Amino acid sequence: MSIDGTWHLTLDSAMGRQEFDFDLKAAGAELIGTGSAEGREVVPEIIAGTLDGAHASWKLKIRKPMKLTMTFTVEVDGDHMTGKTKAGIFGSFPVQGRRT
């Protein structure tokens, strides 16, 4: 199953709905790519990206409105992904996405 492509992810957090866009590409068992978040300043390159079959995980560093590292852990099924994101002290939230 290929994760390569552009993905739009949403999560409902304690701070409301959050939206993210990622360009992801498999490089063996490594996942590389960039991310952006509406209304937030981020470090574009994802870090610690891994891929194991349909399971993927990566981190995205948020700079503003506050410094925070978000960890995404998902399972890919065709053009959809579901999983969770851990947002530092704010806890974990369900996340879902679709390939665009």
Image (tube, rainbow, N blue to C red):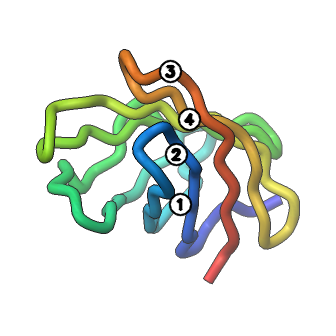
Badge 4 element:
strand
Which label's residue is closer to the chain start, 2 or 1? 1
On screen, 32 above or below 59? below
Which label's residue is closer to the chain start, 4 or 3? 4
Is 76 positioned to the left or the right of 18 in the image? right
Task: Find disc 2 in the rendering and name its residue.
Answer: 31
Amino acid at pointer 2 = Leu
Locate residue 68, reporting x and y percent: 25, 30
In which quadrant is the C terminus drawn? bottom right
Task: Find disc 4 in the rendering and name its residue.
Answer: 85
Is 95 positioned to the left or the right of 15 in the image? right
- Residue at 16% across, 32% down: 67
Locate residue 18, reporting x and y percent: 45, 56
- Residue at 61% across, 35% down: 93
> Can you tell which of label 3 and label 2 is closer to the viewer?
3
Q: Are marks 2 and 1 in contact (CB under 8 Å)?
A: yes
Which label's residue is closer to the chain start, 3 or 2? 2
Is 24 positioned to the left or the right of 70 in the image? right
On screen, 77 above or below 94? below
Examine the image and state in which quarter residue 28 appears.
top right
Task: Find disc 3 in the rendering and name its residue.
Answer: 91
Amino acid at pointer 3 = Gly
Amino acid at pointer 4 = Thr
